[in-house]
């Protein structure tokens, strides 16, 4: 018994440490969400900043920077937003090199032991929002740099997806899976129409005709080749972007609505024996509904038009997550089964030992305790990795109009299906000038 | 025993007071690559090649209105996917042209406004003897223009990043290019998959 005691203590400590290190990755940011929804962006930033330690502890530095980057963007503090989004971009890059120990721990505890590497859509859209920040700061050349960076990343992702697609197809064929396409059809995202659209506007402003045409064609290409992600028509204003009449200035409006989907945990159990089940906790993407049905723009007395959708960011987020889902599932099943088998073996050992006299009885009791701890460890440690950003918008809408040069009051109204106004963004005395990019943003996170 | 505790405590305090930041002065020519992005080594490679080629160019012998050709530094566009300060290259070239003694350079777009303001100020407040006249600037014969572009080929943890830097001297009068050079910097970047 005396020899067994230290062993039990060590095991209990190891398990406790592992359980604590793999603690839950959920955080309730509903107050920030409500402040964003009500358009109180300054308050949202303040609330988020006051909870930054907690957010960093629970979801990591990357999520904290993405959330602060977006909150500052909505609050029109573009320099601060860029600071956080640049930091996030660097952390995504750094996370490529994974810790061996954290990786090993993720096979024992859960995926939260690893550094959060960011979802693909977070990486791409960080650059898109940085581009909007630079443009708002009057730095179009730098905005274009961000779009090129986003395009590069999209190309790398395209290669990655194609490679994974071919690997999945080969694996499915070698396993004689009937309908190969059904397992790979979801990997559709290859380039962002929103990023290309902004590239077209910036290139036009910089006087780069070749780039302007290239990005214009890419927008059409994105819609044509990814119909699943772009179930709406190409914005009718797109054609007008290429040829602005000499006596007119062009006003461009971009609006963001709703919020990106969030990861939720779903739990399933695989039975190993009558009393022992392997817990399978998986993250799934769950959309957050938006009440906004249309966005109307009024430019003084001269123009009135509706914005048209150019990208469903939420759908892109869900689509790109599909790619990682299978590997998360495989790893989770493997890990959880291993843990449950461990409990099973300990249970059998305890039962066998208890039959072997006094000494066996003692060791049997030790094994019993270990079985209980193993079971607790299995159930508490097996948690889905729910880390992700919280405040990317769900939908981007665009539009534009050619008007005489002048100063205008511009009102952007966000309406529900019944035509009720859910939010207004008003720009007073906006100077709209020729040969310049007059791009203005309106957000309604509802 | 007490002494041991004291030593341990003071060691702990020393380490607790340590910071993560360490700074060391290093040779400016030492090549250090951290991220694989555009850095001082690339600037040096490009600038050295450009300066060398520009100074030996026959454009300097072309007849101009003044005794020496006059150059103004124009826009070197950043058409890459990195935030590159292209003025570092153009300023290095400008400094080399000036130092050669064979070329005159004049204030560029960014400084023109300040100089004009100063002349206007002198017109009002400086003595007649020392104030500078309007419409007496030296007109440039050539403008330096160029761009930086990048190309990325990446597969997993391996990437080849190529920078294309082109510079040209364009005649202000005729629009003819009297000198042009392109320098390519190609980098192979490999990231570790794992760390301990």
Image: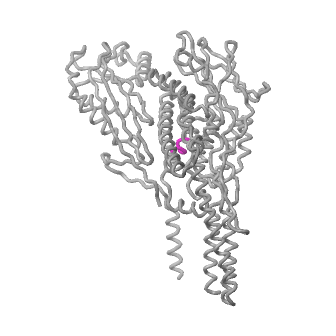
User: In front: A251, or A430?
Assistant: A251
- Picture layout, residue B144 above or below residue B31: above
Q: Is residue B100 left or right of residue A252?
A: left
B116 versus A368 height, above or below: above
* Residue A137 in view of the camera: no
Quarter that holds the C terminus of chain A? top right
Q: Is residue B69 magenta?
A: no
What percent of the width, then of the height, locates residue A170? 50, 48
Asked if the stretch drawn in magenta spans residue A86, the answer is yes
Residue range highlighted in magenta: A85-89
**A439 or B195, which lies in front?**
B195
Q: Residue at x 75, y 33 (%)?
A: A291
Is B20 left, or right, of A19 in this rendering? left
Q: Which image quadrant is residue A354 in?
A: bottom right
Q: Is residue A416 left or right of residue A283?
A: right
Residue B112: image location, x then y, percent: 40, 21
Q: Is residue A2 visible?
A: yes
Rendered image coloring scheme: one colour
Tell me if residue A99 comes above or below residue A219 in the rendering: below
Between A246 and A14, the residue placed more toward the observer is A14
Figure label count: 0
Tell me where residue A11 appears, x and y as whole percent: 62, 74
* Relative side of A282 to A79, left or right: right
Q: Identify the residue at image location x=28%, y=25%.
A: B180
Residue shown at 52%/76% (left/top)?
Answer: B6
Residue A219 at x, y = what percent? 54, 27
User: Does the magenta stretch mainly form a helix, a strand or a loop?
Assistant: helix
């Amino acid at each position: 018994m005396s020899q067994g005691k230290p062993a039990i203590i060590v095991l209990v400590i190891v398990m406790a440490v592992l359980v604590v290190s793999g603690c839950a990755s959920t955080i309730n940011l509903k107050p920030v969400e409500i402040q964003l929804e009500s358009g109180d962006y300054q308050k949202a930033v303040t609330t988020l900043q006051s909870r930054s330690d907690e957010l960093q502890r629970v979801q990591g530095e990357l999520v904290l920077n993405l959330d602060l980057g977006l909150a500052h963007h909505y609050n029109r503090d573009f320099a601060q937003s860029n600071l956080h989004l640049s930091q996030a971009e660097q952390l995504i890059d750094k996370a490529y090199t994974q810790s061996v120990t954290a990786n090993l721990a993720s096979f024992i505890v859960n995926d939260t032991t690893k550094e959060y590497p960011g979802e693909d859509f977070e990486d791409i859209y960080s650059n898109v929002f940085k581009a909007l920040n630079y443009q708002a700061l009057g730095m179009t050349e730098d905005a274009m740099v961000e779009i090129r960076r986003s395009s590069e990343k999209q190309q790398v992702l395209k290669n990655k997806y194609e490679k994974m697609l071919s690997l999945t197809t080969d694996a499915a064929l070698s396993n004689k899976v009937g309908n190969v396409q059904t397992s790979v059809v979801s990997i559709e995202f290859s380039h962002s129409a929103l990023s290309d659209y902004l590239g077209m506007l910036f290139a036009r402003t910089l006087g780069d005709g070749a780039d302007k045409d290239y990005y214009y064609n890419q927008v059409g290409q994105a819609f044509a080749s990814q119909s699943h992600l772009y179930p709406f028509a190409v914005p009718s204003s797109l054609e007008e972007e290429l040829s602005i009449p000499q006596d007119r200035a062009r006003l461009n409006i971009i609006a963001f609505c709703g919020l990106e989907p969030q990861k939720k945990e779903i739990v399933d159990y695989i039975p190993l024996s009558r009393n022992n089940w392997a817990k399978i906790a998986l993250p799934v993407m769950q959309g957050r509904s938006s009440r906004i049905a249309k966005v109307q723009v009024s430019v003084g007395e001269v123009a009135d038009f509706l914005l048209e959708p150019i990208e469903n960011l939420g759908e892109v987020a869900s689509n790109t997550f599909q790619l990682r889902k299978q590997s998360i599932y495989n790893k989770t099943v493997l890990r959880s089964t291993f843990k449950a088998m461990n409990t099973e073996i300990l249970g059998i050992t305890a039962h066998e030992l208890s039959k072997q006299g006094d000494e066996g009885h003692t060791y049997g009791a030790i094994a019993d305790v270990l079985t209980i701890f193993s079971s607790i460890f299995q159930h508490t440690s097996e948690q889905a990795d729910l880390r992700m950003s919280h405040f990317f918008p769900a939908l981007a809408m665009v539009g534009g109009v050619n008007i005489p040069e002048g100063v205008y009051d511009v009102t952007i109204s966000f309406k529900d299906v019944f035509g009720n106004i859910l939010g207004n963004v008003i720009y007073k005395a906006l100077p709209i000038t020729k040969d310049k990019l007059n791009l203005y943003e309106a957000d309604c996170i509802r | 025993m007490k002494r041991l505790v004291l030593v341990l405590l003071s060691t702990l305090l020393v380490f607790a007071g340590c910071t993560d930041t360490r700074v060391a002065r290093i040779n400016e020519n030492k090549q250090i690559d951290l991220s694989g992005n555009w850095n001082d080594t690339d600037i040096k490679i490009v600038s050295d090649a450009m300066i060398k080629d520009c100074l030996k160019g026959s454009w300097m012998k072309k007849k101009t209105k003044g005794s020496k050709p006059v150059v103004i530094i124009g826009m070197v566009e950043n058409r890459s996917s990195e935030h590159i300060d292209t003025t570092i290259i153009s300023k290095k070239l400008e400094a080399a042209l000036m130092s050669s003694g064979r070329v005159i350079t004049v204030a560029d777009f960014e400084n023109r406004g300040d100089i004009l303001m100063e002349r206007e100020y002198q017109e009002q407040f400086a003595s007649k003897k020392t104030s500078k006249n309007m419409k007496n600037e030296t007109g440039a014969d050539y403008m330096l223009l160029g761009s930086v572009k990048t190309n990325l080929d990446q597969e997993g943890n391996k990437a080849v990043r190529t920078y294309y830097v082109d510079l040209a001297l364009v005649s202000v009068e005729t629009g003819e290019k009297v000198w042009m050079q392109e320098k390519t910097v190609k980098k192979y970047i490999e990231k570790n998959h794992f760390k301990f």
